[in-house]
Image (cartoon, rainbow, N blue to C red):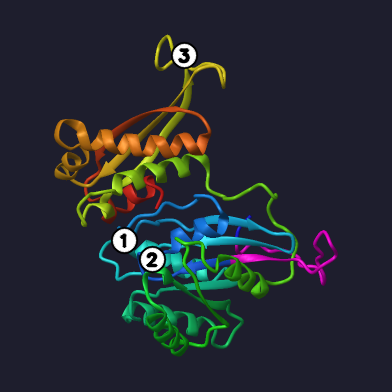
């Protein structure tokens, strides 16, 4: 199911109690590191998007699915809009603009602890232009990180947000404290078009298992590295295979009868970056593996053996062929 896929909407779509049912796609946008991924996870109620204090953590339009009795919200957590310095940066910005043209509602995230800046105005201008002369998406301002400021600062920030553009709604929230999340869900649901449920009740994301594993590994690798390194890290899951725990580590066995092995490759752009990831005596790589393995165990519901390899893909952020190979 895609956001731009044609769907025939009935004049009325009813929930289990005969009430009107709404469904649609919602994009969360904003500058890098404004809390979009944390908010996505809070709305879904489970970790479907990785989080980090490093910018450019999100690189794909990750979908989280929220199913309620009277509505189904398909969340699209987009990369942060930024001034691109590489081909990868340009493609991420293009992904955001493409996504915005396909959704029913845009949640514009504006952190309460940061004043509105040029990046916010740039996004607002794009949204205003999208809604000029044609039917554009509804736009809800989501003031994030309210737990970091006092009431007076929040009140002043809300007034500044109100002046930024003509929002359909403005909702202050704290994803970290789970404050006003239910209110935000209600507001978003009310802005969606009438329509049937699009995904099964128990489906929380459209991300594949391997994509979620690769993102968890990248999240672990982002912890504690230098500011310039996060942009250079990419991860590919080579295989997830069940092997004989007492025999050859490469001999597959029947599912559920052996040891689950995840083999993945972590790519960087230079040999010096490879050294940073590995660390002295392999200590850094061991820490990355331990952090990632804990999250992967939780995702898969069983213990795994994580086999991580590090490779150099020189200047991959600027190389169209390598970007394609790495999924961009």
Q: Which mark is residue 55?
A: 1
Residue at 32% x, 80% y is 117
Q: Are marks 1 and 2 in contact (CB under 8 Å)?
A: yes
* Residue at 56% in and 61% down: 75
The answer to whether residue 95 is left or right of residue 257 is left
Q: The residue tagged with tag 3: helix, strand or loop?
A: loop
Q: Nearer the viewer, residue 33 or 194?
A: 33
Determine which residue is flagged by label 3: 244
Compared across the picture, whether 180 is left or right of 36 comes to right
Q: Is residue 8 left or right of residue 239?
A: right
Count of marks overlaid on the render: 3
Pointer 2 local density, CA inside 10 Å: few below 14, some 14–19, many at least 20 = many
**Which residue appears farthest toward the right when viewing the image?**
18
Marker disc for residue 270: none
How far across and how far down the image is residue 144, in percent? 44, 70
Dot 3 alpha-carbon crowd within 10 angstroms: few under 14, some 14 to 19, many 20 or more: some
**Mark closest to the chain's N terminus, 2 or 3:** 2
Q: Is residue 319 above or below residue 109?
A: above
């Amino acid at each position: 199911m895609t956001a731009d896929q044609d769907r025939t909407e009935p004049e009325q779509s009813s929930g289990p109690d005969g009430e009107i049912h709404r469904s649609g796609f919602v994009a969360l946008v904003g500058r890098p590191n404004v809390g979009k991924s944390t908010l996505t996870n809070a709305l879904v109620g489970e970790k479907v998007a990785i989080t980090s204090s490093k910018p450019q953590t999100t690189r794909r339009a990750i979908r989280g699915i929220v199913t309620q009795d009277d509505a189904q919200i398909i969340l699209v957590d987009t990369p942060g809009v930024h001034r691109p310095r590489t081909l990868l940066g340009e493609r991420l910005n293009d992904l955001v603009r493409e996504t915005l043209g396909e959704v029913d509602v845009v949640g514009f995230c504006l952190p309460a602890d940061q004043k509105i800046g040029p990046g916010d105005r740039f996004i607002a201008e794009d949204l205003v232009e999208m809604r000029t002369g044609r039917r554009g998406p509804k736009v809800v301002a989501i003031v994030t990180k309210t737990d970091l400021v006092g009431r007076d600062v929040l009140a002043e920030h809300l007034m500044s947000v109100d002046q930024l553009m003509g929002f359909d709604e403005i909702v202050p929230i704290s994803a970290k404290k789970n404050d006003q999340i239910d209110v935000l869900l209600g507001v978003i649901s009310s802005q969606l078009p009438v329509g049937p449920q699009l995904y099964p009740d128990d489906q929380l994301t459209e991300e594949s298992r391997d994509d979620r594993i690769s993102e968890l590994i990248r999240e672990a690798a982002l912890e504690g590295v230098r500011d310039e390194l996060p942009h250079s890290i990419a991860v590919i899951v080579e295989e997830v295979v069940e092997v004989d725990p007492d025999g050859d580590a490469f001999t597959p066995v029947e599912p559920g009868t052996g040891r689950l092995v995840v083999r993945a490759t972590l790519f960087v752009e230079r040999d010096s970056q490879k050294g940073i990831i590995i660390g002295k005596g392999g200590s850094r790589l061991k820490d990355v593996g331990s952090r990632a393995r804990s999250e992967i165990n939780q995702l898969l519901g069983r213990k795994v053996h994580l086999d991580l390899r590090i490779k150099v893909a020189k200047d991959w952020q600027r190389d169209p062929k390598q970007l394609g190979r790495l999924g961009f």
